Image: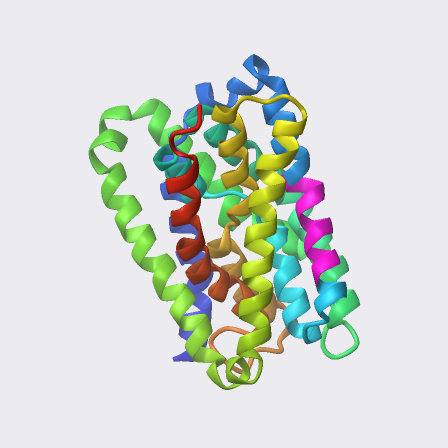
């Protein structure tokens, strides 16, 4: 049963990424050329500042190495369809949000394998097998880039179909995401009980800090509230679905999995729950800022 569940993880993530692609259009990515300043701020914040701040928090709070790696893995997976939905709810710049999600989804094909290999070797390499960067890169392509590309292609070439079925795909994707989070928690409930307090504290600190960084840096650089509150969402909201699924794929790759999902999937699972609790006041506070 565990083997079957783990084998289905790439398919689940692939379906979710396909559903994400159905909500994208090539014209959305052209927004980068129209408004380069807020896009570049968001891009640099997600790609560089976010992982560096996560690393700083790990150094300060000193979680168990397996959880430290889990938090770093989460920081390598920015964006996602959730941030697009939340940007709309906060009355933000949806075009900017979608453009960042689209570009970062493609960039992550290269960055995630490299950064994951480095982080895994540092935190867990001495305890278990090594990660193949090439293998991880190929898996990233087939379970993320390819499904997203297919979704965009369907949306461009069969718009009637995508408009009719997009919401259905997204609802199924949401259910699968919730199941992944619950699976990660229940698979490691004994480990979680020993570190619940520190995990929750670190997750709350991380999300709140990223909201502040995401909205603060753009405002300091003269970006409008309309764009700044969008970047706050983009920087603060990680693709926990990808992080959870990649945790399972990674564990299978190194042959060290003894549960449905490994313990380093827990930070992403906990994050996916706490994030929704913290983003509500953010939306209520900033939705009227223009």
- Pinpoint residue 260: horizontal percent, then vertical percent: 47, 76
In the image, residue 76 above or below residue 48 = below
- Pinpoint residue 285: horizontal percent, then vertical percent: 42, 40
Quadrant (top left, top right, bottom left, bottom right) of the N terminus: bottom left
Say left or right for 221 vs 258: right
What colour scheme has been applied to the protein in the rendered image?
Answer: rainbow
Quadrant (top left, top right, bottom left, bottom right) of the C terminus: top left
- Pinpoint residue 142: horizontal percent, then vertical percent: 52, 48
- Pinpoint residue 200: horizontal percent, then vertical percent: 53, 69
Q: Which residue, as the protein is rendered here, is positioned at the far left? A: 164
Total number of numbered discs in the rendering: 0
Residue 246 seen in render: no
Residue at the image position 72 percent from the left and 77 percent from the top: 128
Residue at the image position 32 percent from the left and 53 percent from the top: 174
In the image, residue 95 above or below residue 181 = above
- What range of the chain is rendered magenta? 46-57
Residue 248 seen in render: yes
In the image, residue 126 above or below residue 134 = below
The stretch drawn in magenta includes residue 47: yes
The stretch drawn in magenta includes residue 183: no
Q: Is the magenta stretch mostly helix, strand or loop?
A: helix
Say left or right for 259 vs 175: right
Residue at the image position 67 percent from the left and 28 percent from the top: 220
In the image, residue 191 above or below residue 142 = below
Residue at the image position 51 percent from the left and 23 percent from the top: 29
Q: Which residue, as the protein is rendered here, is positioned at the far top? A: 34
């Amino acid at each position: 049963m565990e083997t079957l569940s783990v084998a289905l993880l790439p398919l689940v993530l692939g379906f979710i990424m396909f559903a994400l692609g159905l909500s994208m259009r090539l014209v959305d990515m052209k927004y980068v050329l129209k408004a380069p300043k807020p896009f570049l701020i968001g891009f640099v914040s997600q790609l560089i500042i976010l992982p560096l701040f996560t690393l700083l928090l790990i150094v300060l709070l000193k979680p168990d190495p397996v959880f430290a790696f889990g938090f770093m893995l989460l920081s390598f997976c920015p964006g996602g369809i959730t941030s697009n939905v939340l940007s709309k709810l906060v009355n933000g710049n949806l075009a900017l949000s979608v453009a960042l999600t689209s570009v970062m989804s493609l960039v992550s094909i290269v960055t995630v394998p490299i950064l994951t290999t480095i982080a895994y070797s540092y935190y867990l390499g001495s305890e278990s097998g090594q990660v193949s960067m090439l293998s991880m890169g190929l898996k990233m392509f087939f379970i993320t880039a390819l499904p997203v590309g297919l979704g965009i292609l369907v949306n461009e070439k069969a718009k009637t179909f995508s408009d009719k079925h997009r919401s259905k795909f997204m609802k199924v994707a949401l259910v699968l995401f919730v199941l992944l989070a619950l699976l990660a928690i229940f698979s490691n409930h004994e480990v979680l009980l020993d570190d619940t307090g520190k995990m929750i504290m670190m997750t709350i600190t991380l999300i709140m800090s990223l909201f502040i960084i995401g909205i603060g840096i753009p405002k300091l650089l003269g970006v409008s509230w309309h764009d700044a509150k969008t970047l706050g969402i983009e920087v603060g909201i990680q693709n926990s679905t990808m992080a959870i699924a990649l945790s399972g794929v990674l564990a299978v790759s190194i042959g060290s999995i003894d549960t449905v999902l490994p313990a380093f999937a827990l930070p992403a699972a906990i994050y996916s729950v706490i994030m929704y609790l913290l983003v509500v006041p953010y939306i209520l506070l900033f939705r009227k800022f223009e």
